[in-house]
Image: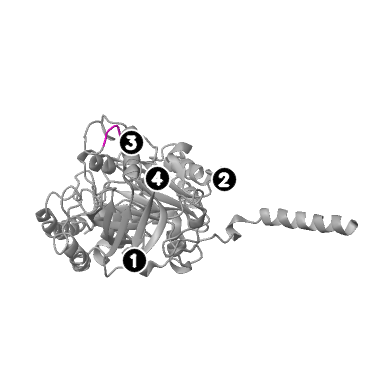
Amino acid sequence: MKFIHGFLAVCLFTGILLSCKNPEETTPDHAGLSDWTDETHGKKADANYSVVFPQDRVNSLEIKMTKDDWSAIRTDMKTLKGSDFGVGGTGGGPGGVNTTTEPRYVAVSMKFNGKEWYKVGFRLKGNSSLSSIWRAGIYKLPFRLKMDEFEDQYPAILDQRFYGFKELSMSPAFKDNSLIREKVTADIFRMAGIPAAQTAFYKVYIDFGEGLKYCGVYTVLETIEDEMLKSQFREDKGNVYKPESNFTAFNQTQFEKKNNEDLADWSDIQATITALNAPTRTSNPAQWRTNLEKVFNVDHFIKWLAVNTTMVNWDTYGAMAHNHYLYNHSTKKLTWIPWDNNEALTSNARVQLSLAGVAASWPLIRYIADDAVYYQKYKTYVKDFNDNVFTTAKMNALFDKNINLITPFVNGTEKEQAPYSNLTNTTSFTAALPSLKQHVVARNQAVANFVP
């Protein structure tokens, strides 16, 4: 009898252990998912940058949703943006409906190189760009893909990845007739020593419930909190933020955490804002600089500021409280990461190399410009970037390579056409390259006048 009781106890204990097994150690049953392999779909596969972010070819991606999915997206967007697709009206922006709520996900089928990815999360993304494209009734919409968004509803796709990547951000080159600004600006940042998300071009076909439609050339970006940190920072444990703040005061709601969400710790941000706005800035500048550098990677920010201002990337901090990330590196402190660069490399009178027009409401820039030590460093970085990276030879080669890469899929063998393109016509695309090249010449001259 004791033996039977002991045997039952062992069985019960074993069952408890099995039921309490770490979910990450559970092997999902991929039965029925014929295209699933560990290399292409599995979580343990290394991020394959050469496949997902090729620099010498344009990948193709097919996305299929049902009519009900598209209808659900439209219903959701009416609530968020105040307008149905193509209706115009009171979408986000001045006088419209503004919300921080993100659009809803729907489960779609995604195909790449003949393989299917199952129940992939698809949602629209963006602020003014999304509102404008939506109201205009253009199907080339900005969106995000999350491979495992629906794993709770569909356990067979537990920890689904796309060649090691969990999420991808798809940019439709809104307000960019060249279609390459998002791509080349990220390249330029990295050429200058500023970590930025990897990018590549994709031809995208989307079925909105009535058959596949060619939606033109997109730029795909890796998301900052996914593989980018490990790839470029060699670590990923620190806090990642996507701010909506001008840094004059700490407001927790303005610093969205993209990781470590369960840890209620914003002390790194709080310390930076406190140090930045400390009264020692004017009473004891040396002490102010020392304290700020203990918590914030000031040198890196000054380099970013120099690069960003030289090439003119106005749609970010200094004009907008968003379009950047922050990563708290274990040794390099809180570090600035650029994001959303589709309006870079365009002339804008508000952007002055001298930083004279920056208001005190943007203290990260204004206070650096007002500090003699930091301002001299800024001028040094401007000249170094202009002389060694942002040259006509290097930029022309970069622009030509990328324009040549996508031309066959914009106005060649495949054409971007309304209502599946944000281009007014293909002539605007061909006219964009000379304009980009002239912009570099003009900025080179502006730098020569600023730091002779």
- Circle 3 sits in a helix, a strand or a loop, which is it? helix
In the figure, residue 432 lies in which quadrant?
bottom left
Comparing marks 2 and 4, which lies closer to the viewer? 4
The residue at which mark 1 appears reads as: 114
Q: Secondary structure at mark 1?
A: loop
- Residue count near mark 2 (Cα–Cα under 10 Å), binned few <14, some 14–19, many ≥20: few
Q: Which is closer to the viewer, label 2 or label 3?
A: 3
The numbered mark at residue 442 is: none
**Alpha carbon separation for disc pair 3 and 1:** 32 Å
**Residue 433 position in % (x across, y down):** 14, 60
**Magenta part mainly helix, strand or loop?**
loop
User: Alpha carbon of mark 1 to alpha carbon of mark 4: how far?
Assistant: 24 Å
Residue 105 numbered mark, or none: 4
Q: Position of residue 193 (x, y in %)?
A: 36, 63
Q: Residue at x 22, y 31 (%)?
A: 89
Front residue (pair 367, 237) = 237
Q: Which mark is residue 75?
A: 3
Magenta run includes residue 74: no
Name the kind of residue labelled 2 in the image. Answer: Leu
Three-letter code, disc 1:
Gly
What stretch of residues is rendered in magenta?
80-84
Label 2–label 3 contact, CB within 8 A:
no
Report how far apart the C-alphas of labels 2 and 4 lie in the structure: 25 Å
Residue underneath mark 2: 263
Label 4 with label 3: CB-CB less than 8 Å: no
